[in-house]
Amino acid sequence: MILDTSIEIATCRYCGSEIPIPQAVQKCKIDGIADFDAVMLSAQEAMDFEKDFDKARERFRKALNLRPHDYRALWGTYLCEIEAIKWAKNYHGFVQVPGDISQKVREAAEKYGERALGYAPENVKRYYFETMSENSAIITDPTEKPAKKKGCYVATAVYGSYDCPEVWVLRRYRDFRLEKSIGGRLFIKVYYAVSPTIVRLFGNNRLFNKFWRKRLDKKVEKLKTKGYDDTPYEDLM
């Protein structure tokens, strides 16, 4: 963001936090020392004002060298990666292989976006999550053949549809959390191996649905408090 010295406080669009302008300006002028705050402000200026995303990415990465787990630096790097992908798509740049754009969006989300989401405070997580979902929907090439959906078999049987608010929450949890860890991917693999048979045998059983509905309702409500949205969602994979 650009510092407006005529005001006392500005709100950062990268993290939603308030920045005291006099203190920020002072930090940028301490003997020319490139401390973390100065590097971050320089990166944000390159991105917001100069629209030089290569320069901004370089500076956000410099900030990451100073603080590898800072969610603002991770998020800024993610935004720069996404802008590079947008440029490549719009100008038919280096991304030419079918499916490559979607892959690069997923890589950017996993390497920077998801890490930023993990370290961010609770009041920022929802914004990050929604932004990544929007970027995935906007950037993905409409000419690409959609990947085969992974059915949330038990949830779909319980709620009666693959596209309903509760299942959208669970699908987001699958794509943005479980897919990001070895244990989560193992769970998904086992789930998709056994759940079709379970649903085929018991999916129309009233007691089965009542049993799982109660548990899934609790899980969905808990996930919603953590920022997993219940709006329409397209699978990442």
Image (cartoon, rainbow, N blue to C red):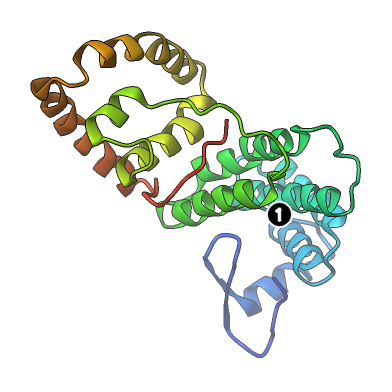
- Could you say which is closer to the camera, residue 36 or residue 160? 160
Q: Within the image, what quadrant is residue 204 found in?
A: top left
Question: Residue 72: percent from the left, percent from the top?
Answer: 61, 53
- Which amino acid type is shown beneath numbered disc 1? Phe
The secondary element bearing badge 1 is classed as helix
Q: Residue at x 22, y 20 (%)?
A: 203
Quarter holding the C terminus is top right
The residue furthest left is 207
Few, some or many residues within 10 Å of mark 1 (<14, 14–19, 20+): some
Query: Residue 164 vs residue 83: left or right?
Result: left
Q: Is residue 181 above or below residue 38?
A: above
Q: Residue at x 77, y 45 (%)?
A: 61
Decide: is 142 above or below 8.
above
Q: Position of residue 157 (x, y in %)?
A: 26, 27
Front residue of 220/100: it is 100
Residue at the disc numbered 1: 36
